[in-house]
């Protein structure tokens, strides 16, 4: 009658070695548990392993032993060497030399497969028996402060135990040591297996999808289309390249007008009662623009104010001068209650470096719109730097167009243009100006 023994130890491999040494290869492992003792709140616990083995009665061996060639050696390496030597002796007698590797492969193919099939059958029986014992073992209460871990967590431990058994014991016809690891309930085992399979399948599908959609390829820099003669000519006039490339077709005037019409257009000067248009720039140029706008809005010179250090050299009376943000704030109370719009010129240039002061005056006035007068002969980067100090700018008026060879460079500021010199800016004005310059360069 078989008997069962309970072995304890800190290392599972030492327990397995002890079982094989003391009880031979015919012993069966009924269950294997990992037990934690002591600790506080799941920490600092000591861990040990409990191994329940079953020792069977000595088998009754048949009177007539099986033929030696049909039985597999307990050591597969020894069996291979033995059959290789036998094959060498036979080949040496017949005079047909073969390599040792070929002889080893032939010998390996002759090893019977009955041992492996028997090991798989024993492992299946062990899982069935362990599943039956799991229900009774889980119902039992662990004494003292011992915590016996059961359930799906021990799946990994059971797999490790089975792997150790497969690595350390070779199945044979005479018997093999089969790892009968503790298994949880059948339902939990099935759920864990299904979950693992689903995760692996999903991960594999994701990797395959990414590999199919993202194919490695070498970096290729973008190939720029060659510039035409017209594109080169427009860029020499200051037009940004992305705009010059959009000028297509045989009619240059119509193409330029179409491109300019696609750009943001400046809003007209505010003309409602109480509106305030602030024009920032060089004093004389800004005053000339203010007079043109006043004529369009049909307001008198009394509605043109000047915020500057002095009115010297201008036609502005000192009563219409604003000394700074404080004076602008006081004047704004009257302006917004009046029944006509006002135009306020704020003297500010990059040389003076008073952009923040001009911004404060415009804020104090509660400006409806802010225009800036820019010099077309100045570098675009310098103009952009000065405009940033002015704060909010709704449109620009370009001055000194006749004195520059690249009048379209102001388009790089990305601000709507309200006036080209002394004329309101329209797509037709841009097209006429640039076509005139193109004709001059071609003649």
Image (spheres, grey):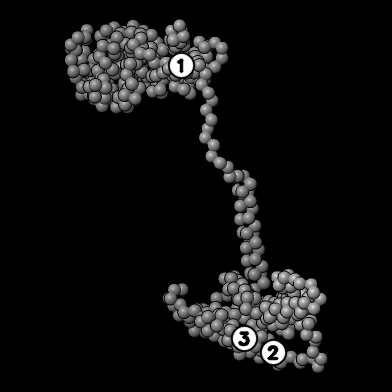
Q: Which mark is residue 20?
A: 3
Label 2 secondary element: loop
Query: At 60% from the left edge and 86% from the top edge, which residue is drawn?
Result: 19
Look at the numbered discs 1 and 2 and tell me whether their residues touch, using CB distance below 8 Å.
Answer: no
The x, y position of residue 160, in whole percent, is 59, 73
Looking at the image, tell me whether mark 1 or mark 2 is earlier in sequence order. 2
How far across and down, in percent of the image, does residue 16 sit?
59, 82
Give x and y (percent) for residue 126: 69, 79
Instruction: Please count the marks in the image.
Output: 3
Q: CA distance from mark 1 to mark 3?
A: 93 Å
* Residue hosting label 2: 56
**Residue 198 falls in which quadrant of the image?**
bottom right
Residue at horizontal 18%, vertical 18%? 309
Residue at numbered disc 1: 234
- Check disc 3: other Cα within 10 Å, few if <14, some if 14-19, many if 20+: some
> Image point 20% across, 24% down: which residue?
326
The answer to whether residue 163 is left or right of residue 60 is left
142 vs 337: above or below: below
Q: Classify 10 Å Cα crowding around label 2: few (below 14), some (14-19), many (20 and above).
A: some
Q: Is residue 22 left or right of residue 286?
A: right
Which label's residue is closer to the chain start, 3 or 2? 3
């Amino acid at each position: 009658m078989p008997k069962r023994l309970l072995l304890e130890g800190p290392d599972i491999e030492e327990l397995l070695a002890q079982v094989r040494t003391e009880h031979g290869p015919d012993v069966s492992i009924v269950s294997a548990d990992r037990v934690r003792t002591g600790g506080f709140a799941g920490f600092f616990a000591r861990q040990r392993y409990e191994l329940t083995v079953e020792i069977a009665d000595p088998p009754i061996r048949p009177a007539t032993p099986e033929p030696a060639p049909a039985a597999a050696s307990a050591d597969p390496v020894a069996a291979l060497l033995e059959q290789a030597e036998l094959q060498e002796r036979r080949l040496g007698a017949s005079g047909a030399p073969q390599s040792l590797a070929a002889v080893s492969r032939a010998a390996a193919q002759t090893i019977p497969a009955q041992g492996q099939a028997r090991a798989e059958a024993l492992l299946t029986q062990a899982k069935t028996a362990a599943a039956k014992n799991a229900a009774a073992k889980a119902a039992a209460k662990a004494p003292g402060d011992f915590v016996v871990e059961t359930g799906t967590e021990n799946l990994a431990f059971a797999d490790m135990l089975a792997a150790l058994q497969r690595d350390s014991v070779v199945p044979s016809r005479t018997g093999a040591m089969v790892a009968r690891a503790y298994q949880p309930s059948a339902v939990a085992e099935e759920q864990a297996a299904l979950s693992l399979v689903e995760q692996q399948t999903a991960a594999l599908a994701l990797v395959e999808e990414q590999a199919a959609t993202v194919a490695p390829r070498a970096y290729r820099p973008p190939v720029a289309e060659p510039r035409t003669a017209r594109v080169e000519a427009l860029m020499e006039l200051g037009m940004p390249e992305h705009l010059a490339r959009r000028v297509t077709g045989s009619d240059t005037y119509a193409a330029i007008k179409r491109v300019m019409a696609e750009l943001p257009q400046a809003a007209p000067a505010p003309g409602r009662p109480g509106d305030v248009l602030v024009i920032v720039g060089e004093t004389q140029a800004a005053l000339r623009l203010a007079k043109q706008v006043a004529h369009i809005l049909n307001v008198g010179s009394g509605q043109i104010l000047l915020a500057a250090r002095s009115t010297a050299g201008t036609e502005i009376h000192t009563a219409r001068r604003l000394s700074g943000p404080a004076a602008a704030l006081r004047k704004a109370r009257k302006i917004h209650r009046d029944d006509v719009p006002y135009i306020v010129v704020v003297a500010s240039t990059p040389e003076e470096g008073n952009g923040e002061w001009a911004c404060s005056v415009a804020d104090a006035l509660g400006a409806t719109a802010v225009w800036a007068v820019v010099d077309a002969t100045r570098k675009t980067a310098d103009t952009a730097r000065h405009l940033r100090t002015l704060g909010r700018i709704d449109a620009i008026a370009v001055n000194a167009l006749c004195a520059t060879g690249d009048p379209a460079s102001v388009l790089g500021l990305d601000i709507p243009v309200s006036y080209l010199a002394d004329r309101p800016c329209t797509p037709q004005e841009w097209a006429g100006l640039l076509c005139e310059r193109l004709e001059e360069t071609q003649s």
